[in-house]
Image (cartoon, helix red, strand yellow):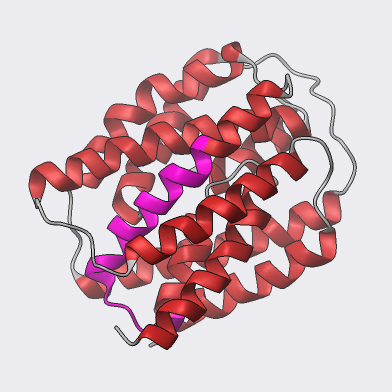
């Protein structure tokens, strides 16, 4: 890949990692969007996105846990089933056209979710007890989707937690980050077992960029709220990339 494209990708992903880590996410949807705009083949997207997702979500999980927002009873019902489900999804390789459409729809949804979360604004307080069987069923579905697409699942879990009233905003971020981490690791492991191959060379340039952005974003987000205007700009980028993947 041309070095100028790699530098642009790394710059964009540094910013994306900051923004996503600030809300407890790994940023895979933004990484996939950037790679789609850059014209990277779908066969490479999932592995690269998962690798970067692991780095940023691990940092976010650490930062939000250290800030005291993590709640084990909210995490384990989703994760215990999502991990094997993500492994199953990661072992499946969709045809290129099907993958592009599925991921394009995921990106469109992610853009809508970010736009909605920017409007939500203030801290939301939990009001309902988490029903464990329902949480496990949701975790299974999100795990499969995470493995198939390489997005980690946090972009879906967060609005579910908030809209249902099962978690407050900071708690949602603290649950989403480790959820993304375990799903991404499971999907990566499955992909390597099914199709062992080294990641593309340019990933070694992208990794330091998302580490810097993710560390700064998680440090900021675990103590403050992200700017809603920035979320809306990112939502527009995701929608653009999602539309490109669905229509082109």
Tell me where residue 203 appears, x and y as whole percent: 33, 63
Q: Is residue 113 visible?
A: yes
Tell me where residue 78 appears, x and y as whole percent: 48, 24
Tell me where residue 182 appears, x and y as whole percent: 39, 31
Furthest-right residue in view? 122
The residue stretch that appears in magenta: 37-58
Q: Is residue 96 left or right of residue 177?
A: left
Q: Is residue 152 visible?
A: no
- Depicted 143 relative to depicted 116: above or below: above
Residue at the image position 43 percent from the left and 87 percent from the top: 4
Q: Is residue 230 left or right of residue 235?
A: right
Residue closer to the observer: 201 or 190:
201
Residue at the image position 61 percent from the left and 55 percent from the top: 213
Examine the residues drawn in magenta and state their main secondary structure.
helix
Residue closer to the observer: 244 or 186:
186
Q: Is residue 121 left or right of residue 19?
A: right
Q: Was residue 46 drawn as part of the magenta stretch in this picture?
A: yes
The C terminus: image quadrant: bottom left
- Depicted 118 relative to depicted 60: above or below: below
Residue closer to the observer: 145 or 195:
195
The N terminus: image quadrant: bottom left
Residue at the image position 51 percent from the left and 23 percent from the top: 135
């Amino acid at each position: 890949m041309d070095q100028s494209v790699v530098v642009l990708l790394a710059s964009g992903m540094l910013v994306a990692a900051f923004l996503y880590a600030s809300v407890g996410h790994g940023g895979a949807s933004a990484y996939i969007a950037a790679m789609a705009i850059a014209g990277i083949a779908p066969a490479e997207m999932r592995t690269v996105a998962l690798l970067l997702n692991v780095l940023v979500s691990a940092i976010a999980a650490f930062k939000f846990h250290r800030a005291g927002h993590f709640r084990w009873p909210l995490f384990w019902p989703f994760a215990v089933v999502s991990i094997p489900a993500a492994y199953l999804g990661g072992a499946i390789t969709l045809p290129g056209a099907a993958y592009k459409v599925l991921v394009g729809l995921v990106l469109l949804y992610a853009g809508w979710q970010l736009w909605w979360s920017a409007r939500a604004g203030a801290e939301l307080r939990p009001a309902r007890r988490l029903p464990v069987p329902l949480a496990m069923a949701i975790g299974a579905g999100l795990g499969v989707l995470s493995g198939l697409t390489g997005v980690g699942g946090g972009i879906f879990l967060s609005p579910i937690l908030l809209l249902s009233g099962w978690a407050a905003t900071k708690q949602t971020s603290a649950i989403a980050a480790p959820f993304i981490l375990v799903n991404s690791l499971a999907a990566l492991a499955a992909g390597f077992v099914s199709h062992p191959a080294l990641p593309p060379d340019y990933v070694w340039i992208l990794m330091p960029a998302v580490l810097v952005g993710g560390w700064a974003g998680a440090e900021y987000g675990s103590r403050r709220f992200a700017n809603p205007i920035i979320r809306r700009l990112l939502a527009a980028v995701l929608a653009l990339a999602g539309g490109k993947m669905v229509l082109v």
